Image (cartoon, rainbow, N blue to C red):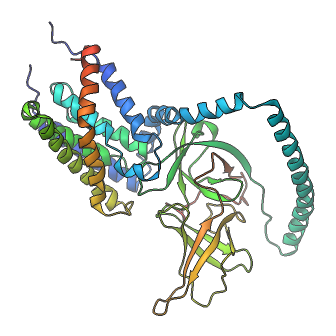
Amino acid sequence: MNDRPAGTGVILVTFFVAALLEVIPMPGQLDWVRPEWLLLVLIYWVLVLPQRIGVLWGFFVGLYHDVLVGTTLGQWGLAYALGAFVMLAAYKRMRVFNGLQQSAVVFLLVGTASLLAFLVQESVGHTLYPPYTILYASATSALFWRLVVAVLHWVQLRFLVR
Amino acid sequence: MVAPANPSYRLLIALILAVVLMVLDQRTPWAKPVRYWLGYLTAPVHYLAHLPVDTGEWLSEQTQSRSDLISDNNHLKRQVLILEQKVQRLAVLEAENVRLRELLNSSADLGANVLVAEIIGVDPDPNRQEMIINKGAGDAVAEGQAVLDAQGLIGQVISAGPLSARVLLITDASHAMSVQVNRNGVRAVLAGTGQSGLLRLLYVPDTTDIKVGDLLVSTGLGQRYPRGYPVARVTDISHRAGTPFAQITALPTAHIDRASHVLLVQPVDDDNAVLKPATGEEQP
C-alpha cells in the first residue's frame, strides 16, 4: 500500500456539505444550538490526516466560513487556524481517547475557537448576547462529534482518502 | 506515518494573514475582492440550502387545479383593474407635484428602477439580522441599494457577491435610518434592536407629537434610502420620569420574516437622483 495522498476532492466535498448544514434554515431558537459543522469536519480530517490537513487548511476553511455567513474576513479564519493547530499538537492523545473523552476535547476546542471568533465580532460591535451563549453550540458540537466521526470514517474508507 | 512539519510557523502566517485581513476588511475597501471571489464558492451553498423551498413551491404549482387557477386569475384581474385606476390618479398627482416643486424652486423627485429578487437565505447568527438574495453584481446589484417589499422598507444591500447579495435588515442592531412621521413631518432616528419586528425611535423628547399608530416614512436624508417609502408603524410610547427621552417602539410595515420576494430600488443616474451610494449616518 502506497502512502501517496489521495482524495482531496472528497475532503473538499465534505467541507461543502458541512457548509450546507451551516446555513440550512432551521426554526427560530434552534439557531442557538447549531453545531459548528465546518469546524467538526476540520477537526476530524486533522485528526486522521495530520500530515496533510493542518493550520493553513484551517485558515482557508475558516475564511470560507467568514464569506458564507458574512462576518469580518479572518474572524473564523483565525479561530479555525488555531483549532487546527491545537488538534495538530494533540492528535496522538486524541486517537487513544474513548468517545466521552474525545467529545470533551471537542467541546473545549469548539468553545475556544468560538470564543476567539466572538472576541473579534465583539470588537467590531456585532454582538448582542453575552459570551456564554457560544457554549450552547459548543455543547451540541460535542454531542454530534461521534456522528461526524462515524460518517466521515465511512467516507474515508469508502473513497480511500489518505 | 510521516510526522507533520512544525506547524508553528504556519500558525504564525495564518495569524498574520487573519489580522491583516480583518483590518483591511474593517478599515478599507481593499478586502472586498476576497469576499467577491469567494462568493462564487459560497453562493451555490445558499442556493442549495434554498432548494427544498423551491421544490415545494414548484410542486404546489404543478398540482394546482384548473378551477384554482381560474379563480386566482380572476382575482388578479380585479386587482390589476383597481391598481390601474390608482395609477391613473397617481400620474396626475405626480405632474401636479412636479409643478408645485417648480414653483418652490426645488428639484423634482425622480422615479427609480426596480429589480425583483428572491430571498434564498437568512443569517444563522442570532446576533445579526441579515438575509441573502438571489441577485448579485451580475444583475447590477450594488452596495447601498434599498431593499423593500410591497408593504415597506426591508433594508439595504451591504455586500454584493457575483451571484448573490447580502442585505442588512432595518431590524439589525447596527442599523439606523432617518424617518419622519407621515402625519406631521416630525423627524427622528429609527434604529434596529436585533430582534425581528422591533424597532426603536431614538432621542425623541417627551413632548414631541407622536402617537401610537403613526406611520413612519423614510426621509432620504441619509442619501441611502429613497424618500417617502413606509418603514414602520408606532406600536408603543412610554414616558418615564427621570429619562430625558420618550421610549418609542415601532413595528416594520414590511413583512420581513414572511416575504419571499423583495424589490431592489436601483439608483437613478442623475444629479438629482433620490438615491446615491454615499457615506452617512445610515452606514452599517
Expressed as whole percent of the image width and height from the top left, the position of residue B226 reads 68, 61
- Front residue (pair A131, A86): A131
Expressed as whole percent of the image width and height from the top left, the position of residue B152 reads 68, 59
Does the image show residue A96? yes
Query: Could you tell me which residue is drawn at 23 percent across and 40 percent down?
Result: A81
Count the labels in the image: 0
Expressed as whole percent of the image width and height from the top left, the position of residue B224 reads 61, 60
Does the image show residue B13? no
Expressed as whole percent of the image width and height from the top left, the position of residue B180 reads 67, 74
Query: Could you tell me which residue is drawn at 40 percent across and 49 percent down?
Result: A30
On-image quarter of the N terminus of chain B = top left
**Which of the 4 image quarters holds residue B62?**
top right
- Front residue (pair B275, B167): B167
Image height of B37 relative to B248, above or below: above
Q: Is residue B28 left or right of residue A39?
A: right
- Front residue (pair B283, A80): A80
**Residue reaching furthest to the top:** A1
**Which of the 4 image quarters holds residue B182?**
bottom right
Image height of A39 relative to A4, above or below: below
Q: Is residue B158 left or right of residue B185?
A: left
